[in-house]
Amino acid sequence: MGFSLKDKWVWDFWFAKDGEDYHLFYLQADRALEDPELRHWNVSIGHAVSTDLNDWKVLPDAIAPSPVPEGSQGMIPADSCTTWTGCVIQHDGTWYMYYTGSSKAEDGLVQRVCLATSNDLMAWEKHPANPLVELDERWYDGLNLERWHDASWRDPWVMKDPASDRYHMLVTCRANRGENDGRGAIGYAQSKNLIDWEVKEPFLAPGSYGEMEVPQVEKIGRHYYLFCSVSERFTSKQQRALLAEEPLNGVIYYMSENLEGPYKSVGSGYLYADAQFSLYSGKVIQGPDKDWYLMGFLNRDTKGDFVGGLSEPMRINIAPDGQLTV
């Protein structure tokens, strides 16, 4: 196991690279809860550091849900219920952590993107205007429990456009068109200052899944790759009809010649997947040797029990046609 804690479950995670140091931010919850399904509602963001992606030193926790002030008169913080998956990007000496917030005002059913900033990756200050980015029902499904179990707008991934002054944000969401079981999409927003975001049409909406989680885009070699995690449970009828075998659980990818697409599935479409659901929420990272690696959280063991730790880095192999394997 690449990273685990004796007293806490660990699952979704993301990185920040500072010189030779890899900073790991991860979702955590106390194992004393006993039922791992309760972890989602008893979560905070932990922090560790490594120089080689294998040996990790645990640091003080980064972020936790905001308390509800007494006498708030309805002003309940957007992250008072949960602080879920995010990303970190640096600009002009400041680190920006975008993360998923949900509020006790809606029992955690509506997700929004929040921001915290830091000068040293250790002390984080939440932005006073949180939440910064919310779904726009012109393109995305809002809360409708007859159709889906939440209003999805989570797992923000932010990247600088190398050819312009824009920043791109990708999120896990659901489009408001198409068959219900295939509305899972990668949502999109853009900004020029990392604070003011304009939500626009979906970045990718293939109709293949009910949800496509933890998106990430990286340029590896001469191609851009969009990674996300999917499950057999939320594979659409449309996608099942295209598969030669039963759908799997794990990390898929799409490839493009350009950052903004179009992105297409190549080969099997899977980077790492199995029927066991052993690994999920995959992230790719360039190691100190300049090779690319996949890590994911260890989800289920051979008995079907939740594990709650992170995998070791797995080297990614790149075929001449751009297909990826680990």
Image (cartoon, rainbow, N blue to C red):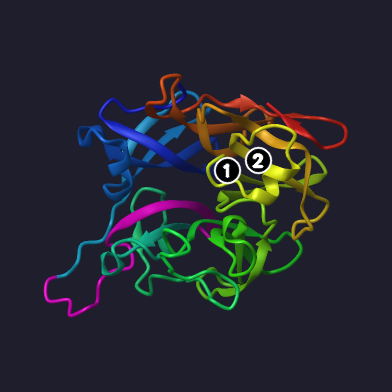
Q: Which is more N-terminal, label 1 or label 2?
A: 1
Residue with the mark numbered 2: 252
Instruction: Give residue 282's quadrant in the image.
Output: top right
Q: Count residues near mark 2 (Cα–Cα under 10 Å), then give few for <14, some for 14-19, many for 20+.
A: many
Which residue is more in the foreground, 232 or 42? 232
Q: What amino acid does circle 1 point to?
A: Ser
User: In the shown orientation, is residue 56 left or right of residue 123?
Assistant: right
- The reply to whether residue 211 is in sight is yes
- In the image, which residues are magenta? 70-94
- The reply to whether residue 287 is in sight is no
Residue 145 at what x, y percent from top left? 41, 64
Instruction: Give residue 294's quadrant in the image.
Output: top right
Q: What amino acid does circle 2 point to?
A: Ile
Which residue is more in the foreground, 212 or 102? 212
Q: State the residue at coordinates (37%, 40%).
A: 47
> From what the image shows, is residue 63 above or below residue 126?
above
Label 2 with label 1: CB-CB less than 8 Å: yes
Secondary structure of the residue carrying tag 2 is: strand
Residue with the mark numbered 1: 229
Q: State the residue at coordinates (43%, 35%).
A: 49
User: In the shown orientation, is residue 232 left or right of residue 201?
Assistant: left
Instruction: Give residue 17's quadrant in the image.
Output: top right
> From what the image shows, is residue 170 above or below residue 22?
below
Residue 192 at what x, y percent from top left? 61, 72
Residue 74 at what x, y percent from top left? 22, 78
Q: State the residue at coordinates (29%, 50%).
A: 41
Q: Label 2, label 1: how many angstroms apart (C-alpha)?
A: 6 Å
Magenta stretch encompasses residue 79:
yes
